[in-house]
């Protein structure tokens, strides 16, 4: 099992545990609301013996509907919080991958975004310090395959991870944050399908 698969597995285990807890809490709250509603309904029927059976039925339906709505809201909020937490943990784990795996990932991303032009690839200060030997050679090789040329200047850009390509003064943001932002909805849907 690769490091990424282990990370995915751990994220899913953590997410499933958190989801179960939040869903249980939401159910408890909804059940408490139902108990309270039933108590209110019993008190109303004692006070208002003159009310018709239809009025009692309508009131119970409204209370049940409100409880159902509260339960749905609580579940939705718990799901949204859980999805955001899973994506946040995935982001952090991606940034903390071992150097070998992390820089291999950067090369895969570069293969998608390299242009047939001369440019520069900027890394974060942290990544510049831990860049493995041969990485710059691989960057140049990928750029050449695309018909271009890339260099890695010694200066860094302010970012958590990933890189920024600069071609003729135009920047292509390939940071990890930018990728997560661009694919947030897609990945949120994927996490929701896996968890729920």
Image: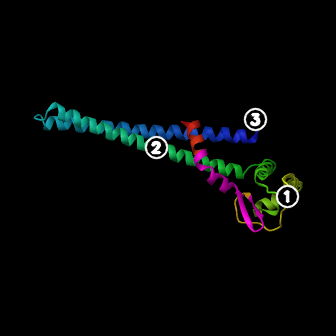
Q: Earlier in the sequence, mark 2 or mark 3?
A: 3
Answer above or below: position of 144 versus 47.
below
Q: Earlier in the sequence, mark 1 or mark 2?
A: 2
Q: Marks 1 and 2, how far apart in space?
A: 48 Å
Q: How is the image coloured?
A: rainbow
Secondary structure category for the residue under label 2: helix
Secondary structure category for the residue under label 1: loop
Residue 45 shown left or right of residue 30 in the figure: left
Q: Earlier in the sequence, mark 1 or mark 3?
A: 3
Residue 65 shown left or right of residue 109 in the figure: left
Which residue lies under the disc numbered 1? 148
Which residue lies under the disc numbered 2? 76
Q: Is residue 170 magenta?
A: yes
Where does the image place residue 107, in percent across and percent down from the top left? 80, 51
Q: Residue furthest left?
A: 50
Q: Which residues are magenta?
A: 163-186
């Amino acid at each position: 099992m690769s490091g990424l698969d282990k990370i995915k597995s751990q994220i899913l285990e953590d997410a499933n545990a958190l989801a179960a807890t939040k869903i249980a809490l939401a159910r408890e709250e909804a059940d408490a609301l139902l108990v309270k509603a039933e108590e209110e309904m019993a008190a109303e029927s004692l006070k208002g013996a003159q009310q018709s059976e239809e009025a009692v039925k309508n009131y119970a339906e409204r209370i049940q509907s409100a409880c159902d709505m509260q339960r749905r809201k609580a579940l939705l909020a718990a799901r949204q919080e859980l999805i955001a937490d899973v994506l946040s943990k995935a982001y952090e784990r991606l940034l903390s991958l071992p150097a070998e795996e992390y820089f291999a990932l950067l090369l895969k991303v570069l293969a998608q975004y390299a242009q047939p032009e001369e440019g520069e690839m900027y890394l974060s200060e942290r990544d510049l310090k831990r860049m493995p030997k041969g990485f710059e050679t691989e960057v140049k090789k990928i750029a050449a395959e695309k018909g271009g040329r890339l260099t890695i200047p010694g200066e860094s850009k302010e970012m958590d991870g990933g890189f920024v390509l600069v071609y003729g003064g135009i920047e292509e943001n390939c940071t990890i944050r930018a990728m997560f932002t661009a694919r947030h909805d897609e990945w949120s849907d994927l996490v929701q399908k896996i968890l729920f």
